[in-house]
Image: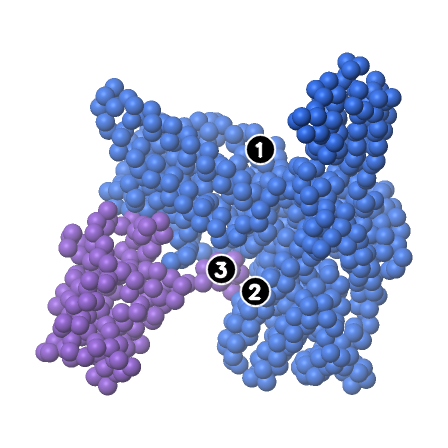
Chain colours: A purple, B blue
Amino acid sequence: MSSSTALAPVSSRTDLQSAGTANGNEEQYVTFTVGSEEYGINILAVREIRGWTPESRLPNLPDYVRGVINLRGIIIPIFDLRARFGGGPTQVTKRHVVVVMQVGERTRGILVDAISDILAIGHDAIKPPPDVDSGLIDAEYLSGLYTAENRMVTLLNVGKLFAGEHVDQDAAARAALEPT
Amino acid sequence: MDDLSRFKQTYFDESAELLAVAEAGLLRLAPGEVDMDEVNAIFRAVHSIKGGGGAFGFNELVAFAHEFETVMDGVRNAEIPITTELVDTLIRANDVLARLLAHAADETEAPAGTTDDTVAALRRFLGKAGAPAEDVAGVPPTATMLHPDDEDDEAGIFGDALAAIQAARDDRPAAASSGTIPEGTLRWTVVFRPKAELLLSGNEPTYMLRALRRLGEAEVVCHLDKLPSLRDLDAELLHLSWTVTLLAGPQVDRARIDDVFEFVADDCDITISAEAPPPAIIPPAEPVAVSPAVPVPAGPAAAATPITPAATTSGTAKPGDGAKRAGGAAGGGDHAGPTTHTIRVDLDKIDRLVNMVGEMVITQAMIAEHLRDLPPGQFQELLEGLEGLAQHTRELRESVMSIRAQPVSSVFSRMPRLVRECAAATGKEVMLVTSGETTEVDKTVVENLVDPLTHMIRNSIDHGLESPEERERVGKPRAGTVHLSAAHRSGRIVIEVTDDGRGINRAKVLSKAIEKGLVQPGSTLSDEEIDNLIFLPGFSTADQVSNLSGRGVGMDVVRRNISSLGGRIGVYSTPGEGSRFVLSLPLTLAVLDGMVISVGEERFVLPLTNIVESLRPKPADLHGLVNKCDVIMARGEYVRLVHLHRLFGIPKAIDDATRGLVVLVETEDGSRLGLVVDEVLGQQQVVIKSLEANFRRLDGVAAATILGDGRVALILDVAGLREMSRHGAGNGTGSSVPSPPSLPAPADRTDQRQRQTV
């Protein structure tokens, strides 16, 4: 079993780095890199950050569904963020990181290259996402853009990001049974 | 514990969930885009609330739910268009239903007129849709007046049920205050005061006390009040006396107790008194037969309906406890049932325990895997210790599972009432025979059996059985028989509902299915396929809509409930002789005996119950069949080969069956497949983990588990694999005929399935 970084020590860095503490107008975001891009998700959705452990693959699913891993007795799916954004499957190394998120009732992980920062971001500092061609990624997956120093951080809406994976299997099964 | 109130509580709990389902569904309904699944779900929720309410005699609630349901039925058949106004009304109706349920739960009357406005609003939609035979204007919108055609039925069902419930209530206090004596036993109180000279005549009171003990469960209290101080004590004399409380079966009578004291009768004072349990109202134990002598009219006959008293007197009551608790029981109210050595434990705590044991099984497997590589002979003690650990783990697991196991009698005991009501409502004569009630199965499974069984039995009576006159005409006894049985069979529980009615009318089923658009006209279906059409949503052959069934909910709900428990349902019908519905369910939802196999770099678990054998075929055993799929000759029959790696798209796997292994698997209905895998790694108990909790269901995958090395492996669903391979091998999904659900093995096949030679 590889290392699983508890969140507390990471977030304590925040106080040193970001001048403003989180007040009513600010929310904290965990940011991470995938390739040269930097993304952020609301820290409240993040349950833990852990090192890469080999996954078990699931049959007949798109390549961004990496597989499932055992998270202390529960089975959670891992999504490959690079593949999700059309960058092809990630060649994993021991340095890759899984961000375990709580989305509603479900726990799921996303595979990213590295954790980069924790930022306290004021609501006003978030710019709306520009019109994106609805090719690879829908604008609704993005909750906004933020400029940290001179880097752009894309803030993700985790609730929407893998919403397509909630397929009502009952409905699907019934649809299969009922010829149209 | 009072059976009836327990069922009621279950009903209210379930209804609360159903209301939430209906509400969530209603909120998603929008004009224009009709999601039929959603509509069906709402309809079913209301229907289930109505059905359960009927069983408890909540008349107003049932009448209202019927209104609600009728409108939903219209929506479902696209007779009533979905408008914002409709949705608002339906949501209001849902609220009213919730209020009625709350009143029912509090056992209070809903204020008069609670439902009037909503009923009127609901009926307006029916009027618009031109619903037949409903005189909207003429009839005042009073819930109970609305269905003259149902009126008789309701009087029959609910007069019956109400009287029975009342009878149960009247009995309860009596049963509680003296309920400390288990069924079928007498409590004897023997006060034994020997004279001081008893010992001088060579008698020994100890022997008598022992003799009493042999008659039953005895508690002996020794009275020391006559005991003099040590200085005054005469060791030759006896200063003690005793009170013996004896719980004994009916075979012990006064004479046998007198016999014990035969030789000392003159030398002592003995008072013997007996206390019997209250005259119990118990239906004959097994098999339970409910046969209404006359097609039950409402009223007096019904009042005599025996309410099955708590079937949970299994714990052995110690008389001492009985005596001690007797005082407290009077004030104890409802809780004073028969004294048992039980404690109530929060189900969450048990579940946590089950989970922990599951983790332990995994950890133990992990240690075992690591130690397997140790040089032999060197760590003997360690290995022995591990063997012990494995054994203890297994026993621990079984004990924990048995905590959750309950006899199916808790479900079966609800059925006589249901049968009686259905019989009364349909004017049929029905005899219910049950067997195997003591079969134990996981609590979750038991709980989820109620709905399906209710539907199935209703269905058997309503559709399966003929009227008494018709039965006489065809030379059958007037009373139809419905047989409900449970049994353990090769690691599963099999529940059968058999009736001796007319069987499935295949011509009618088929024409109905075509009419409903479920089957393309002109399709040729086998008898088995036709029989299985009844499991499709929206299917119903009943010409009339009754309170009982006939709205086409039921069998599809049954199948969904059952498959959500990992079970399967099948129907076997012989025209003129009756139908047999067979449910097969896993005993527990937590652990499975599996075989670990590998394909490429992936590992999977095959349920042991599916495996017939594994073999490495010789090239001569393999044959190509119309160049689409391969077949293998195994045990004298041709079996289709399914390459797991092709089905699942796994790289680096062995494609040539002669170099890998073929695992011969059998689905519940006895059809076989040859799964081509790389290797069979070994047998292992695995803890079933949900894939759906955090992800979703996948084709061909039943669940997941965690192997000894901490990695996840998928548990294969053999029936699902067969379906997948069919679509892959055939011409896609072009078939107009819904594939029949896989059926459990009929009784005579199970013996063959026992042999698992791997």
Q: Which residue is mark 1?
A: B749
Q: Which is more foreground, mark 3 or mark 1?
A: 3
Distance of mark 3 from mark 1, alpha carbons? Answer: 30 Å
Q: Chain of mark 3?
A: A
Looking at the rendered structure, the number of numbered marks drawn on it comes to: 3
- Tell me which label, 1 or 2, sits earlier in the chain: 2
Q: Which is more foreground, mark 3 or mark 2?
A: 2
Q: Position of residue B56 (x, y in %)?
A: 73, 61
Q: Residue furthest front?
A: B231
SS at circle 3: helix
Distance of mark 1 from mark 2, alpha carbons? Answer: 39 Å
**Residues marked 3 and 2 touching at CB (< 8 Å):** no
**Residues marked 1 and 2 touching at CB (< 8 Å):** no
Q: Residues within 10 Å of mark 1 (few under 14, many from 20)?
A: few
Q: Residue B233's mark? A: none
Q: Does B740 sit above or below residue B492?
A: below
Q: Which residue is mark 2?
A: B17
Q: Which is more foreground, mark 1 or mark 2?
A: 2
Callouts 1 and 2 in the same chain: yes
Q: Which residue is mark 3?
A: A170
Q: Residue furthest top?
A: B202
- Give whichever of A37, B217 is nearer the camera: B217
Side of B642 where B126 appears, left or right:
right
SS at circle 1: helix
Q: Quadrant of the C terminus of chain B?
A: top left
Q: Chain of mark 2?
A: B
